[in-house]
């Protein structure tokens, strides 16, 4: 059998086994089903949710917050990273500040955004943008630093304009890093969006989870967690597909396909 | 390095932070804005807020929960990752399920764990941190172990290295950089979860105090809390970098040798 097909089958088998365990544990009484309902119950609840408008509204709100935050973070990260990265003096003088600001957990800003915006979407947006921008910015800085100096000097001695150097020399080198930044930022942005909804009560799936849990709707809590996990998987797959698409010419992707 | 070069580097590291702090200080100096108190007020509030009783009742418990959870996640993640990574069949079997668990945003674990045991004790918070941090470590370890050079493994086997020394001298070092990458991701997740878990249970802790300040409209104190959380993030990342630098020193050496540097 083809290796990939075999791996796929094994993977499905593994998922099935997880489902079976989650079905068996509560039914056998090893885990109290008030805390962990059987997988079939969660699945039924999930099926029911898919038919409700409120669920899709919440999903739409979460996705909108995620996309918007991610776009803003990408724009800031790429532009700021490109500028800082191409000017050595700027890079030298900003690196300590970037290294200092980056590890500050964006959740530390929660009290502040609550104070300023309460549970409006702006609160989530601020957290998402703060957290995701660093991922992009730092990757772009790596990318610009990776540009071959000989290529750059060659372009310069052929009197390429600044703009065409940026387009033909810097951008292709930095692109793989930009996309790595995008992949990391996409995951982080989703985490912060859901967190803001859960903790602050910004409308969306996270808020729905918090509400389901506090009202004792246990199967619904699990169903929503599964949905959020599936969105996370899709986000990852999407980011990887984008990488493959935009970098089909790049050695790292070509090697992967050949192997 | 010349004295001049060193001076320049120090200058480069200090100038922007000084400018930013000065700007913050000046812009808020006469601030009557409720949200943005003068930085001076915040700084004055700092020692009284954090160096008293709170250090023992809030900061230390938070930090110890964070460290315990992180350490457990690291050990469990590396152990399970090595076991899974060494067998192609187990890997194929578990990969989609693991990818799913990793994709679940860690903060939603909080309400799920709250279902089981309520959310007041320390244990549930540590469990949250462990369950959130373990996935990046685990998956990165699997990835690292999978990429170990086959020839190297065969050589070790034909020299009849025992399982244990194979693990210690061949597999773990080879997977080291990848494991470190996972550990770094896990660290920021750990900090996030430490804060989130305390925002939930009305309890002691660093995150809980910051929220109490905010709800009680003690704005300068709230700012000091944000600063403490920021400093904690920075300190952890510096410590991580130092440890990583030590542990992976040989790796950097090998890489530089490869590049002919």
Image (cartoon, rainbow, N blue to C red):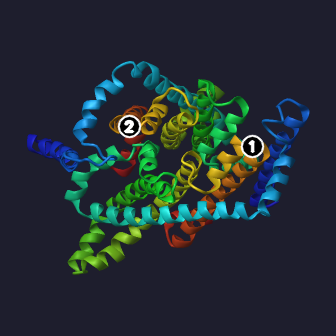
Give percent across and percent down for residue B74: 56, 32
Residue B56 drawn at (x, y percent) = 43, 18
Report the side of B88 relative to B133 (left or right). right
Chain ID at mark 1: B
* Front-lying residue, A221 or A3: A221
Q: Residue at x 13, y 46 (%)?
A: B8
Q: Going by the image, does A1 lie left or right of B212?
A: right
Relative placement, left or right, of B33 versus B230 is left
Marks 1 and 2 close (CB-CB < 8 Å): no
Q: Position of residue A177 (x, y in %)?
A: 44, 61
Camera-near label (1 vs 2) is 2
Q: Residues within 10 Å of mark 2 (few under 14, many from 20)?
A: many
Disc 2 element: helix
Give the position of the N terminus of chain B as an image quadrant: top left
Residue B59 is drawn in which quadrant? top left
Q: Secondary structure at mark 1?
A: helix
The residue tagged 2 is B222
Label 1: how many residues lie within 10 Å, few (<14), some (14-19) or many (20+)?
A: some
Image position of B57 with respect to A143: above or below: above
Mark 1 or mark 2: which comes first in sequence?
A: 1
Relative height, residue A119 to residue B55 (above, below): below
**Residue of label 1:** B90
Q: Residue at x 27, y 46 (%)?
A: A96
Pick whichever, B260 or B39, lies toward us: B39
Q: Look at 42% across and 53% down and name the residue there.
A: A130
The chain containing the residue under callout 2 comes to: B
Q: From this viewpoint, is residue A81 visible?
A: yes
């Amino acid at each position: 059998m083809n290796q990939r097909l075999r791996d796929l089958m094994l993977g499905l088998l593994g998922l099935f086994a997880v489902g079976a365990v989650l079905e068996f544990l509560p039914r056998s009484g090893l885990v109290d089903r008030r805390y962990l309902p059987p997988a079939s119950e969660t699945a039924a609840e999930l099926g029911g949710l898919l038919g409700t408008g409120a669920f899709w509204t919440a999903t739409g709100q979460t996705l909108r917050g995620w996309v918007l935050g991610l776009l803003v973070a990408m724009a800031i990260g790429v532009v700021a990273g490109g500028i800082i990265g191409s000017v050595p003096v700027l890079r030298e003088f900003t690196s300590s500040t970037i290294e200092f600001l980056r590890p500050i957990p964006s959740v530390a800003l929660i009290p502040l955004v609550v104070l300023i915006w309460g549970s409006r979407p702006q609160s989530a947006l601020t957290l998402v943008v703060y957290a995701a921008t660093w991922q992009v910015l730092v990757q772009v800085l790596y990318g610009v630093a990776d540009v071959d100096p000989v290529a750059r000097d060659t372009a310069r001695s052929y009197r390429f304009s600044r703009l065409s150097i940026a387009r033909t020399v810097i951008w292709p080198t930095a692109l793989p890093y930009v996309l790595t930044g995008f992949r990391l930022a996409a995951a982080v942005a989703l985490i912060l969006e859901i967190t803001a909804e859960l903790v602050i009560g910004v409308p969306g799936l996270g808020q729905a989870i918090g509400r389901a849990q506090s009202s004792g709707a246990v199967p619904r809590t699990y169903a929503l967690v599964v949905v959020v996990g599936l969105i996370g998987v899709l986000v990852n797959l999407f980011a990887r597909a984008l990488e493959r698409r935009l970098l089909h010419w790049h050695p790292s992707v070509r090697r992967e396909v050949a192997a | 390095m010349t004295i001049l070069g060193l001076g320049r580097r120090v200058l480069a590291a200090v100038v922007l932070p000084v400018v930013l702090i000065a700007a913050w200080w000046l812009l808020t100096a006469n601030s009557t804005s409720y949200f943005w108190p003068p930085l001076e007020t915040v700084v004055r509030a700092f020692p009284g807020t954090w160096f008293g009783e709170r250090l023992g009742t809030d900061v230390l418990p938070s930090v110890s929960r964070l460290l315990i959870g992180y350490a457990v996640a690291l050990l469990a993640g590396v152990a399970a990752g090595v076991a899974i990574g060494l067998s192609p069949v187990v890997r194929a079997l578990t990969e989609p399920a693991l990818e799913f668990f990793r994709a679940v945003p860690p903060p939603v674990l909080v309400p799920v764990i709250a279902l089981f045991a309520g959310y007041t004790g320390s244990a549930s918070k540590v469990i949250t941190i462990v369950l959130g941090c373990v996935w990046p470590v685990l998956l990165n370890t699997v990835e690292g172990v999978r990429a170990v050079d086959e020839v190297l493994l065969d050589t070790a086997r034909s020299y009849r290295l025992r399982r244990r020394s194979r693990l210690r001298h061949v597999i773990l070092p080879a997977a080291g950089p990848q494991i470190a990458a996972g550990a770094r991701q896990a660290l920021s997740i750990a900090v996030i979860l430490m804060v989130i878990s305390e925002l939930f249970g009305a309890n002691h802790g660093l995150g809980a105090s910051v929220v109490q300040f905010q709800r009680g409209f003690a704005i300068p104190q709230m700012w000091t809390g944000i600063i403490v959380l920021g400093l904690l993030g920075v300190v952890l990342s510096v410590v991580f970098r130092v440890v990583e630098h030590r542990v992976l020193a040989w790796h950097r050496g090998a890489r530089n040798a490869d590049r002919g540097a």
